[in-house]
Amino acid sequence: MTKSKAKKEIERQYSLFWNGSFNAFSLNSDLEGSLKYLKLENEIAIKRHISNSGLTEKQIIASEGYLRDELKKIDQYPKTITPMILVYLTSTFEIFLKSIIRILLKFNPEPIKNNDKKIPLQTILASSDLDELLDLILEQITHDLGYKNISEQISYLNTKININLSFKKLKGLIANRRFINIEEIQEIFLIRNLVLHNGGIVNKQYLNLTNRQEYKEGEKIEVTKDDIQNYFTTIFHGTSAISRQSKLYIKEFKTK
């Protein structure tokens, strides 16, 4: 893969992440307005039904009760929507991260030449050329990485590929352009795991890995609109740092 093609692929993946997350970001930003509009629509539809359907007094009372119940349900929507946005955001970040790793290793496979993982003969024979074989190997590497926690996946960019991300905040705006808050991202993913696999209920693993004092085992974490805003900020900054450092790695790479 040439420098030019690798750079374009990095930019394409960053654009896909941004575009894929923007709608969810917009929904979260205008969540109150969206719910207010939804409540108004329901109210108009049911009141129109009451006015135009020739209902008895008993049916009118039942319809008004139904309306109140529906409006109460809508008030509960944020408790469902915000966790869904969290799951979507973390999933798009994982896709972005794996794509960047594949691009960088295809551009320069040197970091995986000493990989001790055996390649099945069937995989080799199924490949039409070395380029296709490399794609299959990279797919397996990123698949295996997916079983590691997110901080280990991000660290792979430094330990194996060496794109020089910073995991500590530095002084100065320019210096911090390569900073990724790996601890905060790790916690975001731990919360995602609780939401996805444990109904949002805090467990011992979460408490041991975060040392959070405000939660107790068995309590439920409520993901709020403000939480989502903070998660977006952290992850967007992280994707920007990964994209920037990956392009710099490609630019400064010298063929041996």
Image (spheres, rainbow, N blue to C red):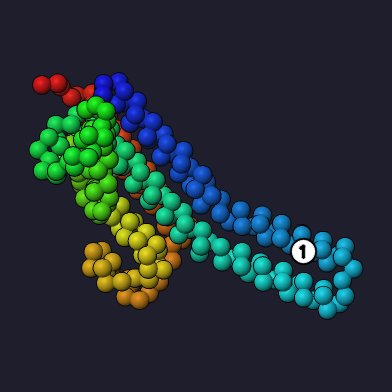
Residue at 26 percent across and 72 percent down: it is 204
- Left of 141 or right of it: where is 23? right
Query: Residue 173, image x and y in percent?
Result: 28, 37
Residue most toward the right? Answer: 54
The quarter of the image holding the N terminus is: top left
Residue at 61 percent across and 57 percent down: it is 35
Does residue 232 sit above or below 105 in this rendering?
below
Q: Nearer the viewer, residue 39 or 89?
A: 89
Query: Residue 127, image x and y in percent?
Result: 25, 32
Query: Residue 144, image x and y in percent?
Result: 24, 48
Residue at 14 percent across and 21 percent down: it is 255
Query: Residue 137, image x and y in percent?
Result: 22, 38
The residue beneath circle 1 is: 46
- Left of 126 or right of it: where is 26? right
Count how many numbered circles sit on residues in the image: 1
Quadrant for residue 200, please give it.
bottom left
Does residue 161 sit above or below 68 in this rendering?
above
Q: Nearer the viewer, residue 132 or 222?
A: 132
Q: Identity of the amino acid at label 1? A: Ile
- Left of 109 or right of it: where is 84? right
> Badge 1: how crowded within 10 Å, few (<14), some, or many (20+)?
some
Does residue 255 sit above or below 137 in this rendering?
above
Q: Nearer the viewer, residue 112 or 119?
A: 119
